[in-house]
Amino acid sequence: MRQIERDMISAIKLGKCWHKANTEVYTNDNNASLVYLHGNHIATVTDNNVRVFDGGWRTNTTKSRLNVIINEFCDALTDGVFQKDYQWFIKDNNEVVEFESGYVFK
């Protein structure tokens, strides 16, 4: 995990607004942490779930940030985002589905 990703996770856990280079975390009035990459919304983390977005850019950096969040706040063994043959997929509880922006891990 990159240092910027460690700092991002720390900000989410503490419920603090934070930014460094291309990554930002904002905490709203509902204690949800909204994560942005290059100004594009890529995740929302609440006490109850994690919602993931591609922000319009399906890049390795987006995928890396999403997987760090999923590994920390979901089940790292059964959940994640991956790419095969240039197409993105979500693994949720070991079930694989096509990536859908706005997908909610519970």
Image (cartoon, rainbow, N blue to C red):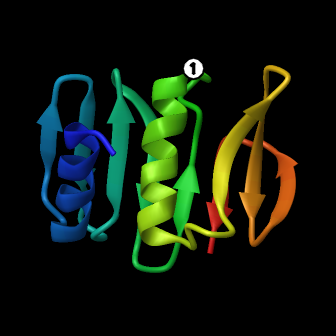
Quickly name the residue at label 1. Answer: 57
Q: Nearer the viewer, residue 25 or 62?
A: 62
Q: Nearer the viewer, residue 105 or 96?
A: 96
Task: Report the number of numbered marks.
Answer: 1
Q: Is residue 90 above or below residue 53?
A: below
Q: Residue furthest bottom?
A: 48
Q: Point out residue 6 in the picture as x, y percentages from the top left corner.
A: 23, 51
Q: Left or right: where does residue 88 sit relative to residue 105?
A: right
Q: Is residue 90 above or below residue 58?
A: below
- Could you tell me which residue is drawn at 23 percent across and 68 percent down? 13
Q: Is residue 42 visible?
A: no
Q: Is residue 13 above or below residue 2?
A: below
Q: Is residue 31 visible?
A: yes
Q: Left or right: where does residue 64 sit relative to residue 94?
A: left
Q: Is residue 84 above or below residue 81?
A: above
Quarter of the picture containing the C terminus is bottom right
- Could you tell me which residue is drawn at 50 percent across and 45 percent down? 66
- Could you tell me which residue is drawn at 27 percent across and 32 percent down? 23
Q: Nearer the viewer, residue 93 or 17?
A: 93
Q: Report crowding for label 1: few under 14, some 14 to 19, many 20 or more residues within 10 A (C-alpha).
A: some
Q: Left or right: where does residue 49 sit relative to residue 35?
A: right
Q: Point out residue 48 in the picture as x, y percentages from the top left corner.
A: 49, 79
Quarter of the rendering containing residue 85: top right
- Could you tell me which residue is drawn at 40 percent across and 78 percent down? 47
Quarter of the picture containing the N terminus is top left
Quarter of the rendering containing residue 40: top left
Q: Point out residue 98 in the picture as x, y percentages from the top left corner.
A: 85, 43
* Residue type, mark 1 in image: Trp
Q: Left or right: where does residue 30 sit relative to residue 74?
A: left
